[in-house]
Image: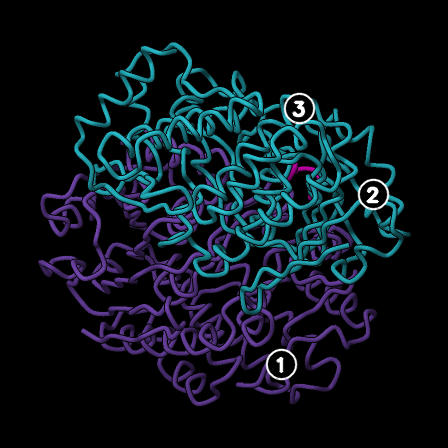
Chain colours: A cyan, B purple
Amino acid sequence: MHTLTVNLADRSYPILIGSGLLKQQGALDAYLPSDDVLVVSNESIAPLYLHGLTELLGDRRVATAILADGEQHKTLATLESVLNRLVAAGFNRDCTVIGLGGGVVGDVAGLAAGVYQRGVNFIQVPTTLLAQVDSSVGGKTAVNHPQGKNLIGVFHQPSCVLADTQTLDSLPDRELAAGLAEVVKYGLIMDAEFFDWLEANADKLIARDAESLELAIRKSCATKAAVVAADEREQGQRALLNLGHTFGHAIERCLGYGEWLHGEAVAAGMCMAAGLSERIGWLEAGSAARIAAVLASMGLPVQPPAIDAKALYQAMTLDKKVIAGEIRLVLLKGIGEAIVTADYPEAELRTELDASLAAA
Amino acid sequence: MHTLTVNLADRSYPILIGSGLLKQQGALDAYLPSDDVLVVSNESIAPLYLHGLTELLGDRRVATAILADGEQHKTLATLESVLNRLVAAGFNRDCTVIGLGGGVVGDVAGLAAGVYQRGVNFIQVPTTLLAQVDSSVGGKTAVNHPQGKNLIGVFHQPSCVLADTQTLDSLPDRELAAGLAEVVKYGLIMDAEFFDWLEANADKLIARDAESLELAIRKSCATKAAVVAADEREQGQRALLNLGHTFGHAIERCLGYGEWLHGEAVAAGMCMAAGLSERIGWLEAGSAARIAAVLASMGLPVQPPAIDAKALYQAMTLDKKVIAGEIRLVLLKGIGEAIVTADYPEAELRTELDASLAAA
């Protein structure tokens, strides 16, 4: 087992990474001061891992909230149903909420923990690659609004993240690929060497080579932990983690949530960010093609779906990163070097959208 | 104008107290970096002060969310309606939410600001005495759940609190008295001298003597600011501010929210806390009667309404301050000295409930 620490002063917490952790008695005890535990999971994941997790909880009082599966259920109504479970169980401020599942489960469980009684203890047990490398680290929680993704949420750090790599065995290929999109992101934003490694090992990763996957998870979590520690509330550097996301969220919004997986939209979004970066002369010619080739080799889309360019642009303006009307984007100065900026010609952004959509 | 500072490191903020502040051009400018402002108010307060507040906002883009008046509207559904206004206005992470009104408006507006885009700038403009001395200071926000008060919320500190004492002119007598209950609380928990002053000046306060009210507000805010600065997230000392509240919340829950005003329930609750404290020998004989006399002179109830003792006890067990099944109460060691404790004979609590209800 590897342990990484996210350094956030009195809210620091460990990320435990390893194979079979959900079968290690006592693995969570240090982070579970509560007698009362609500496990939030979904109808796909609960049958696989809920029993094992419950074994780890010993004789604590355990209630469950089993959500319908899918991004379309990441809503205020679902949040309310989880809060109702906490109230119905009679749980107080000293309870713990555990999120067992992918990003949607983690986001809803984390938000419930963040707002129940103004904040209770929270543990993440991510069971998808995307959640293990991204959404479970950093304390962002949210639900979607019909008009926009993640518009309602809080920052609420977990007391522990337990990433059992064995849970990836049950992950569909498409979701594995979607998780790899975020792994590639870490290389692109600040680690050219890691990007080279990913380029060389993409085949092993999609073949689920255990050692390669564990290395990719460790590397990704370490990068994310460092970024989050430096900038917990996304005032600066943390925004780099949104490479491809302003484009990606807009794709998801235009298509309707759940049509494409988040990681798929981010993959296409990163290609558009790279395309724009190359278009304005920041990124060496050929780099965007190289990035697209890695993502394509992982089975990810490298163009947006066939949607209207104006609608896509409009959807980008509702992004949380829009400040004073300017669409701030994460762009690349090179592979391994990203910046957040609104300092690009808007016409070039529109050209990039048109070009990407023409290729779609 | 008096300015008090709530010291919370990078979240420190001022409380501006004075008569006519809502007519002082530029009063809010230092705390309003936003072009986009949502004013949350209610149908009683908006006709009185919304126009004046809007004048202070200059040429900023202003949207409004006008809530129905009353504690029964402090719900998730109301929160959602406020969030819908923010989305419909197209406001981003750089917007400001202003709560103009009493405790309910402040709590809903603060929670909306706390969860919209994971937290946006927030300003409190309290227009009731209760809100000026209590709920607008300290960053607690919440809505009620059908099964319990304030069960859903976050800590979200405002960037500024503007308390214009002129707004109290329009406050009904009953609400003025409810606010005074919280003022008395500050004397009881940590300032015997202030309690003496309140005892001597209760008649001036209910007669709305401007100077006396302003002094009471300043003193109350200063006490609350000091307590909050020492213990932002209610791990310790801050719980003292809940004197009378575990009893009071239980009364509100049993009666149905909105039947009694919060301050009325707290007044009766403080009498019960004082009664129990005297019963177990912590408070000098006669002190509970002295406390009740001050509250009664302000027109406040000093006994609970006629409800079932078992239901009242049961309602107390759902309080947020219940830890591991124990009902922790704020009790008095003397006038001006409170402690949080579960170290009292449970039978005495039941006796106090029976005795208070018998007098009801």
Q: Position of residue A71 (x, y in %)?
A: 57, 25
In the shown orientation, is residue A154 left or right of residue A316? right
Q: Nearer the viewer, mark 3 or mark 1?
A: 3
Q: Amino acid at mark 2?
A: Leu
Which residues are drawn in magenta?
A82-87
> Is label 2 in a helix, a strand or a loop?
helix
> Is label 1 in a helix, a strand or a loop?
strand
Q: Amino acid at mark 3?
A: Asp
Q: Position of residue A227 (x, y in %)?
A: 47, 55
Q: Nearer the viewer, residue A161 or A65?
A: A161
Chain assignment, label 2: A
Residue visible at 38% across and 57% down in the picture: B175
In the shown orientation, is residue A131 left or right of residue A2? left
Q: Nearer the viewer, residue B160 or A24?
A: A24
Q: Nearer the viewer, mark 2 or mark 1?
A: 2
Quadrant location, the C terminus of chain B: bottom right
**In the rendered view, would you say A291 is above or below B27?**
above
Residue holding disc 1 = B332
Asked if both marks, 2 and 1, belong to the same chain, the answer given is: no
Q: Position of residue B172 (x, y in %)?
A: 33, 54
Residue visible at 49% across and 69% down in the picture: B232
In which quarter of the view is residue B9 placed? bottom left
Residue holding disc 3 = A69
**In the rendered view, would you say B15 is above or below B87?**
below
Residue visible at 76% across and 58% down in the picture: A32
Mark 3 surroundings within 10 Å by alpha-carbon count, few (fewer than 14), some (14 through 19), many (20 or more): some
Asked if both marks, 3 and 2, belong to the same chain, the answer given is: yes
Q: Which mark is residue A53?
A: 2
Are the residues at dot 3 and dot 2 in contact (C-beta closer than 8 Å)?
no
Q: Position of residue A10 (x, y in %)?
A: 57, 69
